[in-house]
Image (spheres, helix red, strand yellow):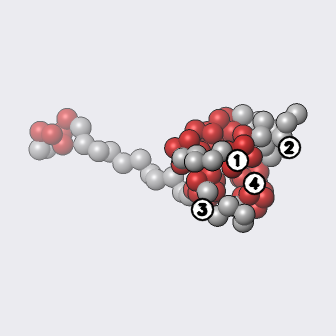
Amino acid sequence: MKGDGDDPRALIREAYRIEGITEADCRVIFLDWAMGQPEETPAEPAIRRLLDRYGPAEPDHPMTRVLEESFGEAETPRRRGGRRARLGR
């Protein structure tokens, strides 16, 4: 095992080591990390521990922003129009 209990494949750790990594790259890595988490294990505590581990030393790193944003509340989906809206009904 290359990582630890919070980051078994060391994806997050490696993201912090990649020079010039973009926020989009970090989002892809985070999604890969999240998909690899056991279904029965809540991700939030692990994300908090990862932020505690890496965030203070790298507050402006794109992965820090991605991890922080993972706690944001999802927007409620809104209908954006459709046939009736186009017809003015």
Which marked residue is nearer to the observer: mark 1 or mark 2? 1
Along the viewing direction, whichever of 47 and 1 lies nearer the viewer: 1
The amino acid type of the residue labelled 4 equals Leu
In the rendered image, which residue does mark 2 sit on? 4
What secondary structure is marked by label 1?
helix
The x, y position of residue 53, in whole percent, is: 78, 58
Q: Can residue 21 be seen in this view?
A: yes
The x, y position of residue 84, in whole percent, is: 18, 39
Q: Which mark is residue 54?
A: none
The amino acid type of the residue labelled 3 equals Asp
Callout 2: few (<14), some (14-19), or many (20+) C-alpha neighbours within 10 Å? few
Q: Which residue is drawn at 58% across and 46% down?
A: 21
The x, y position of residue 50, in whole percent, is: 75, 54
Cα–Cα gap, marks 1 and 2: 16 Å
Cα–Cα gap, marks 2 and 3: 24 Å
Q: Contact (CB < 8 A) between labels 2 and 3?
A: no
Q: In this view, does 50 lie above or below 89?
A: below
Which marked residue is nearer to the observer: mark 3 or mark 4? 3
Q: Contact (CB < 8 A) between labels 3 and 1?
A: no
The amino acid type of the residue labelled 1 equals Arg
Callout 1: few (<14), some (14-19), or many (20+) C-alpha neighbours within 10 Å? few
Which marked residue is nearer to the observer: mark 4 or mark 1? 1
Q: Contact (CB < 8 A) between labels 1 and 2?
A: no
The amino acid type of the residue labelled 2 equals Asp
Give whichever of discs 4 and 1 has the lower sequence position.
1
What secondary structure is marked by label 2?
loop
In the rendered image, which residue does mark 1 sit on? 17
Give whichever of discs 3 and 4 has the lower sequence position.
4
